């Protein structure tokens, strides 16, 4: 099936109809800039609120459950709706969905900034999640269509992934700066000027693209996927937040979510025109890439959580100092993203992703040298290796996944990649958090001079151990505090070892990826879908520029995509 790509309408030309212009030449790099700004906003909003939680708590006085929803509703809604909006973009137009996402994001940011009650802030954060779910898969799918040449697309994905790393790291730093000078609502208001610029610029520069409209859009399947993912992500987040897996709400969410996703898969397999073509997973490169994304995020997010606790609670660093300590990881990730296209072209997906996993495992093992006292050189070395290795892994996996996807399914493929990213992050927090707690608690089961009740409370977390030691005071308090720090460091080492084992598992899985970056005759792994789907510069270079009157003839005979038929 052939996807269509046209530029933004000019002079009344409709997207996807004769009169629309293809994106070519330098314009595609301007498109990349617009897409990166979109991604930067979504990545920032995922982390910028974390430092504002104390100020929000003081001003709005939310209950414990309300505060949890204020923090979690954005990623929860965003992850749940990725497949819905990714496949909707394939049907009605990816640019259209992206621009609506811009508008929703801007409106929701204004509502969140001016919220006067916890309920209103929760609703605004949920609407931000809807906007984020519209923006994220659209950026990747438009990027896939604008860069048909795989070598250029690899460079574009490298820039895109580097921006994602910057956004995630800069969020807490930007939030801390704004809170020092303004009120907590400023962390949301910063989105509005950028959205006011992105809307008209995006309408002017971004090309419209869509997949083939074979059969009706599966509304029931889309809602089933959204509800199933909501249940799974909610259950995973509750498990990662300290709730037991056997807790009624946690277990119920996981069971209902898994059941709905099972029914969704069965429904898609039985439909002549599925919402998501699950045959993509039969391609070794696609399925392996998705699995690698899950494993990489599983290791990364769990490690970041444990590292942040170590830096603040064991070493006593402030949130701002903690953010600065993690900057080497961000800079290394940026470097890997910017140089990733050259590495991928030279070594191929298999070697790049497998070596990225192995390098990350080496970094994790290096970090086992961290102890109760600060060791900046060791930490910088470990974080640099971690950032470069993990970004190389994610870059290679995302590029292989997108290149394997048929053009008419690229929005759904991008949504699958982003969903696996979110699920991997949630599972990582739950799994590595559980490992950390299991290794930490036994060390506090019997502390000299401390009652069993106090020891049990201290065994919940290092933060609670500090509170108990403060209440006890004197020698008993000091002994409990010292024992808690030692137990936490022990738990950190065990968690790092488990993470290294998962990363080595990912390295072995990556051996199923293609050994070479197959660029085809024009640099596109998927081959030319159709002369009309390729930019004019490429068509002229290959000597296939359309002659007058060819449009109707080409429309009458749809050329099957080489990449859509190929099986590796």
Image (cartoon, rainbow, N blue to C red):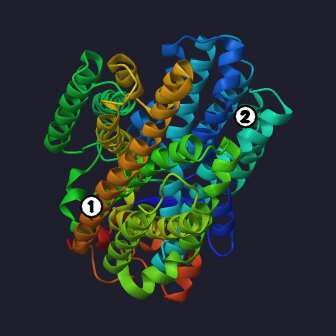
At x 51%, y 46%, the residue is 310
SS of the residue under disc 1: helix
Residue 195 in view here: no
The percent coordinates of residue 435 (x first, y second) are: 30, 43
At x 68%, y 21%, the residue is 56
Q: Are marks 1 and 2 in contact (CB under 8 Å)?
A: no
At x 30%, y 47%, the residue is 214
The percent coordinates of residue 188 (x first, y second) are: 71, 32
Q: Nearer the viewer, residue 150 or 545?
A: 150
Mark 1, residue position: 501
Q: Nearer the viewer, residue 483 or 512?
A: 483
Q: Quadrant of the C terminus?
A: bottom left
The percent coordinates of residue 461 (x first, y second) are: 43, 31
Mark 2, residue position: 187
**Eyeballing the image, is 429 above or below 205?**
above
SS of the residue under disc 2: helix
**Eyeballing the image, is 173 above or below 179?**
below
Lower position in the chain sequence, tag 1 or tag 2: 2
Circle 1 Cα neighbour tier, 10 Å, few/some/many (<14 / 14–19 / ≥20): some
């Amino acid at each position: 099936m052939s996807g269509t790509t046209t530029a933004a309408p000019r002079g009344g030309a409709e997207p996807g109809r004769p009169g629309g212009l293809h994106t070519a030449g330098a314009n595609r790099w301007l498109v990349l800039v617009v897409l990166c700004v979109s991604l930067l906003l979504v990545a920032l909003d995922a982390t910028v609120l974390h430092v504002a939680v104390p100020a929000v708590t003081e001003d709005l006085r939310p209950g414990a459950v309300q505060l949890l929803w204020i923090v979690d509703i954005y990623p929860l809604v965003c992850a749940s709706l990725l497949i819905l909006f990714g496949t909707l973009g394939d049907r009605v137009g990816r640019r259209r969905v992206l621009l609506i996402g811009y508008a929703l994001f801007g409106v929701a940011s204004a509502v969140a900034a001016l919220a006067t009650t916890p309920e209103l802030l929760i609703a605004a954060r949920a609407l931000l999640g809807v906007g984020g779910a519209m923006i994220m898969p659209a950026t990747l799918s438009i990027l896939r269509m604008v860069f048909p040449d795989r070598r250029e697309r690899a460079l574009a994905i490298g820039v895109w992934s580097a921006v994602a790393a910057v956004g995630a790291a800069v969020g807490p730093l930007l939030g801390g700066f704004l809170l020092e000078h303004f009120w907590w609502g400023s962390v949301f208001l910063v989105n509005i000027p950028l959205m006011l610029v992105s809307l008209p610029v995006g309408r002017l520069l971004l090309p419209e693209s869509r997949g083939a409209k074979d059969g009706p859009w599966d509304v029931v399947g889309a809602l089933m996927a959204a509800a199933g993912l909501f249940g799974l992500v909610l259950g995973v987040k509750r498990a990662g937040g300290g709730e037991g897996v056997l807790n009624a709400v946690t277990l119920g969410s996981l069971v209902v979510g898994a059941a709905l996703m099972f029914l969704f898969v069965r429904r898609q397999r039985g439909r002549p025109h599925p919402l998501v073509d699950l045959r993509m997973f039969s391609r070794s490169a696609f399925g392996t890439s998705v699995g690698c994304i899950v494993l990489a995020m599983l290791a990364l997010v769990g490690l970041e959580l444990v590292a942040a606790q170590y830096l603040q609670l064991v070493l006593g660093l402030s949130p701002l100092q903690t953010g600065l300590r993690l900057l080497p990881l961000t800079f290394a990730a940026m470097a890997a993203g910017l140089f990733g296209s050259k590495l991928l072209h030279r070594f191929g997906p298999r070697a790049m992703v497998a070596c990225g996993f192995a390098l990350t495992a080496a970094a994790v093992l290096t970090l086992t040298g961290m102890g109760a006292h600060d060791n900046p050189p060791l930490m910088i070395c470990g974080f640099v290796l971690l950032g470069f290795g993990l970004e190389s892994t994610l870059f290679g996996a995302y590029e292989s996944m997108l290149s394997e996807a048929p053009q008419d399914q690229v929005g759904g493929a991008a949504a699958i990649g982003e969903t696996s990213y979110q699920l991997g992050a949630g599972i990582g927090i739950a799994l590595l958090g559980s490992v950390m707690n299991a290794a930490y608690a036994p060390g506090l089961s019997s502390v000299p001079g401390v009652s069993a009740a106090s020891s049990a409370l201290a065994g919940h977390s290092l933060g609670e151990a500090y509170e108990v030691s403060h209440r006890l005071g004197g020698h008993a308090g000091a002994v409990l505090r010292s024992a808690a720090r030692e137990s936490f460091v022990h738990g950190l080492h065990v968690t790092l070892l488990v993470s290294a084992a998962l990363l080595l598992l990912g390295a072995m899985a990556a051996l199923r990826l293609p050994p070479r970056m197959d660029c085809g005759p024009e640099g596109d792994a998927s081959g030319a879908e159709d002369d009309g789907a390729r930019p004019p510069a490429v068509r002229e270079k290959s000597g296939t520029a359309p002659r007058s009157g060819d449009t109707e003839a080409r429309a009458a005979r749809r050329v099957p995509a080489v990449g859509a038929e190929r099986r590796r």
